[in-house]
Amino acid sequence: MADDWDDIRPINSQAQERLGYPTQKPLALLERIISASSNEGDMILDPFCGCGTAVHAAQKLGRQWIGIDITHLAISLIEKRMKDAFPGIAFTVEGTPKDLASAQDLAARDKYQFQWWAVSMVDALPYGGKKKGADGGIDGIIYFKPDGKRTEKALVSVKGGANVSVTMIRDLHSAMEREKAPIGVFICSALPTSAMLKEAAAVGRFESEATGRTYPRLQIITLAELFQGRKPDIPYVDQASVKRAKREDMGRQDRLI
């Protein structure tokens, strides 16, 4: 190869491999770099992993790998990317909450990282990407198709503090009305009060023509319930709205870390 690599184009807004991460690099670029600088079975380290292009290329090329990133937004995206591209892959993730205590610790240390982690736990898209600041009471969005055709959205609001109140439920309901969202999901660390449960129930239920069922319009989920596997009760989540990595045809898949 010559010094000037002009045959690999940057990822544009319409690229099939685009995952929505602002600094994403083309997979072909990282495959070339790793192929040129390592051998099969070698260890590849990416200490600023972003959306995981380097570790994706390393796995595809039969290398071992370690990826590091400081944001839980990136970590959750990398986990999803690797599982989509390499079904059945096994790897360990260090530093993300594994139980209620570690989730509460993250919430106390960095509310934004906690929000991004909690949003990923319910398979929602982070609202506003990596931006920090005023969000109008919205931390994530889940797109769904109640009739199998038209797309609606469920708003996700995350509160990691020890104190929660009925005002927070009213704020989420206001955001739902403002955004014309039929469903809202409130994730909290503390147990909801009876007033919060009553206020949420008063928002009513949403009917899906396709399933013939009704769903609570405002759903409250605690961190403890998340770790027990509870997910928002929403009909026909729109998987097309969630960017997925292309599945790799590997033949064999036995080099993991």
Image (cartoon, rainbow, N blue to C red):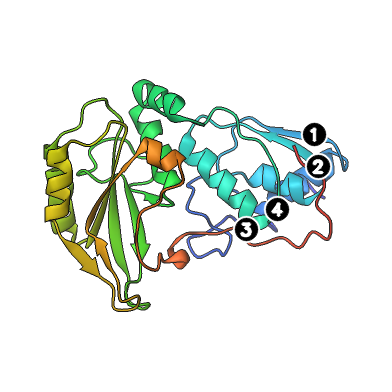
Q: Are marks 2 and 4 in contact (CB under 8 Å)?
A: no
| Residue 242: x %, y % from top left | 46, 59
- The answer to whether mark 3 and mark 2 are in CB contact below 8 A is no
**Which secondary structure lies at badge 1?**
strand
Q: Residues within 10 Å of mark 1 (few under 14, many from 20)?
A: some
Tag on residue 63? Answer: 2
Three-letter amino acid code at the position of disc 1? Met
Q: Secondary structure at mark 4?
A: loop
Q: Which residue is mark 3?
A: 9
Q: Distance of mark 1 from mark 3, alpha carbons?
A: 27 Å
Q: CA distance from mark 2 to mark 4?
A: 17 Å
Q: Which mark is residue 140?
A: none
Q: Nearest the camera: 180 or 134?
A: 180
The first of marks 1 and 2 along the sequence is: 1
Could you say which disc has been placed on residue 88 in the image?
A: 4
Name the spot of residue 45 as percent of width and height, x first.
71, 32
Q: Nearer the viewer, mark 1 or mark 3?
A: 1
**Disc count in the image?**
4
Report how far apart the C-alphas of labels 1 and 2 lie in the structure.
Answer: 6 Å
Closer to the camera: disc 2 or disc 4? 4
The image quarter in which residue 149 lies: bottom left
Tags 3 and 4 touching, CB below 8 Å: no
Q: Residues within 10 Å of mark 2 (few under 14, many from 20)?
A: many
Q: Residue at x 81, y 44 (%)?
A: 255
Residue type highlighted by circle 2: Arg
Q: Amino acid at mark 4?
A: Gly
Mark 3: which amino acid? Arg
